[in-house]
Image (cartoon, coloured by chain):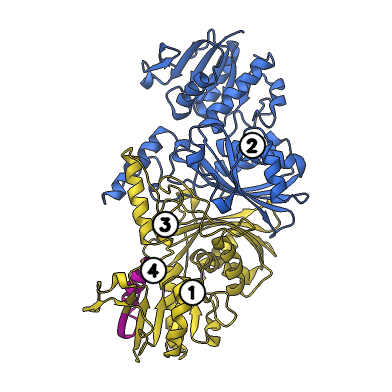
Chain colours: A yellow, B blue
């Protein structure tokens, strides 16, 4: 079986390190692995298959013999380096928002639209984590009964912001417990024992970028711009895994038993929905693994064919690293790399 | 000015202690104050207006000369003791769910339906905290443009469960930070750095009691059963103040500027809505005071005349103790006690 030269760009970040872990776990066919990050992280050492790999500085010359480049370096750097990687013959799977809405770039969830990889031009985009987690859970329902409208409120973990936010939550939590002064650097307001209705920058219409990603990316991935969507995205003091409260309005009635059945058979999902026995998903179930968990499945009679769902998944894994590597696996399977 | 003999039943609980604090702050016309709790708390000492008041055990004989009884003792005990207090001539303001849906008991938010106190028969019910906080913010909108449907997801503080839950969150948070084993006693699942889509018991339809309270109590307080409502109530690792993401469908269009204007002029509310300058309410703004804060006001074009709001308030104060004492003030004002 052919093996591939793989590069992780942004290797020292929360998603980058998870990519390294997931490559190992899935036994990805790696010939040679290169780890890139900014100058600051140069020389940092990681283990991969009994080899020491030292982080190199990401430069224009980084992609000489890369076949698959996994990017998690933020939109600005992705825009700069992805075209260079492609010129050098690499296929880029980019975790930033840089190319997601680009008409020439497929936006892929392997469980939802794997066929879209076929029209890639060197770059494939990995969706926004909250969008990705939601769409894995709602797409199987949409296939049976078209979704007309989505109202979602999110409960997002700080690791979505990155390693510094994890440290801030730890530090602030300890300060609150010890009755000491709390300082905020990563977030504009204290996140420890608080809830912030603010993820990413605000647009003029009052929505945040994160909220509008959930609208536009869902349309693109599901290939259906007629689904009406509104989102309120909220940061909660949780380290890992995003939770979503999702209200759907369907074209035709599905009972909660039918929804449970549909979701139980769908790929990448685990139904945890037995409230009488206190079974519903929380971040403790999802953190560290690749499934999207669904529970609290309830018919909503406040609207015709309404449905409520509670969706939880590890946004560093299925919401980012694992999804990117699953895309790479499809590329290999279809000889598209 | 006449002064009244007041009793706080459940005086040692999180809400009971807040009631004592609010009586002092508002300079409530207290002639004699009695504090009741269970046998366990008997003899505990509180200060009120330079007097030491010792907690007495709540018994059938507790209400001999009580005029106003503030109850926060849970539904079971309220059902037992409220009729006894009324027989003894007291007017009961009950914070439990025991009488809220009783047709002979008014369910009051002073900013919303103060006129309903007039038909009380000795007992007046204080609404569920999440419902109360939501209704203070949405009722002024409803008066201008009828609300057709509400979809809400909540972010509720542990002090809503009581003092033991506050201790559990502290203890578990420290254990997680120290890498030690976490044990859960109050909640079925760890609450520290986690999110639980579960508040109160589950009904057969999959909804919790808390979620159905938000439906039925909203109808009763607003006097409009035609409003369609669905709720997902969620516990978050926050000590005090509930936050709510609320999506409304209105009968006629209101712009976000119009909504800001309506809410700015409404009683008991504070609008904090200037996202460009990072101004939106969080629990840090509300905790310790009596206002309901509203921000993230956004028109929602996923439905005709849609609107999104972010609502935050201290559920021990406006959501419980302060509201009960405001009701008592109305009773006095209207000579109904």
Q: Is residue B92 left or right of residue A333?
A: right
Pointer 1 local density, CA inside 10 Å: few below 14, some 14–19, many at least 20? many
Identify the chain of the residue marked 2, using the numbered disc in the image.
B
Q: Is residue B80 left or right of residue B255?
A: left
Q: Is residue B140 visible?
A: yes
> For the residue labelled by badge 1, is the local secondary structure a helix, a strand or a loop?
loop
Vertical side of B265 occupied by A134: above or below: below
Identify the chain of the residue marked 4, using the numbered disc in the image.
A
User: What distance separates the C-alpha of mark 2 from that of mark 1?
Assistant: 42 Å
Pointer 2 local density, CA inside 10 Å: few below 14, some 14–19, many at least 20? many
Q: Are marks 2 and 3 in contact (CB under 8 Å)?
A: no
- Count the marks: 4
Pointer 4 local density, CA inside 10 Å: few below 14, some 14–19, many at least 20? many
Identify the chain of the residue marked 3, using the numbered disc in the image.
A
Q: Position of residue A112 (x, y in %)?
A: 54, 75
Magenta span has A16? yes
Magenta span has A285? no
Identify the chain of the residue marked 1, using the numbered disc in the image.
A
Give the residue at mark 2: B136
- The residue drawn where x is 44% and y is 85% is A84
Give the residue at mark 3: A158
Give the residue at mark 1: A126
For marks 1 and 4 on the same chain, the one whose residue lies earlier in the sequence: 4
> For the residue labelled by badge 3, is the local secondary structure a helix, a strand or a loop?
helix
Marks 2 and 4 belong to one chain: no
Give the residue at mark 4: A15
User: What distance separates the C-alpha of mark 2 from that of mark 4?
Assistant: 42 Å
Q: Position of residue B35 (x, y in %)?
A: 45, 16
Q: Is residue B224 left or right of residue B192?
A: right
Q: Tell me the magenta residue range.
A: A14-34
Image quarter of the N terminus of chain A: bottom left
Farthest right residue? B252
């Amino acid at each position: 079986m052919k093996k591939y030269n793989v590069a992780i760009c942004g290797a020292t970040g929360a998603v980058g390190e998870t990519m390294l872990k997931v490559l190992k776990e899935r036994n990805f066919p790696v010939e040679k692995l290169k780890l890139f990050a900014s100058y600051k992280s140069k020389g940092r050492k990681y283990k991969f298959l009994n080899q020491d790999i030292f982080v190199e500085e990401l430069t224009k010359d980084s992609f000489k013999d890369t076949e698959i480049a996994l990017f998690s370096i933020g939109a600005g750097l992705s825009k700069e380096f992805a075209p260079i990687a492609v010129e050098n013959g690499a296929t880029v799977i980019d975790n930033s928002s840089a190319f997601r809405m680009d008409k020439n770039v497929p936006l892929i969830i392997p469980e939802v639209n794997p066929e879209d990889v076929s029209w890639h031009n060197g770059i494939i985009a990995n969706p926004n984590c909250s969008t990705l987690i939601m769409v894995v859970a709602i797409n199987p329902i949409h296939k049976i009964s078209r979704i007309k409208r989505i109202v979602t409120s999110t409960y997002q973990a700080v690791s979505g912001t990155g390693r510094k936010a994890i440290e801030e939550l730890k530090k602030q939590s300890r300060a609150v417990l010890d009755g000491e002064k709390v300082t905020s650097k990563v977030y504009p307001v204290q996140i420890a024992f608080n809830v912030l209705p603010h993820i990413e920058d605000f647009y003029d219409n009052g929505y945040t970028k994160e909220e509008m990603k959930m609208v536009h990316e869902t349309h693109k991935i599901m290939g259906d711009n007629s689904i009406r969507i509104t989102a309120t995205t909220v940061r909660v003091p949780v380290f890992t895994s995003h939770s979503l409260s999702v209200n759907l309005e369907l074209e035709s009635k599905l009972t909660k038993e039918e929804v449970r059945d549909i979701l139980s058979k769908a790929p990448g999902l685990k139904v945890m929905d037995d409230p009488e026995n206190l079974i519903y998903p929380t971040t403790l179930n999802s953190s560290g693994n690749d499934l999207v968990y669904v529970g609290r499945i309830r018919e909503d009679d406040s609207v015709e064919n309404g449905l409520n769902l509670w969706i939880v998944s590890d946004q560093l894994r299925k919401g980012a690293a694992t999804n990117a590597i699953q895309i790479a696996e499809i590329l290999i399977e279809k000889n598209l790399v």
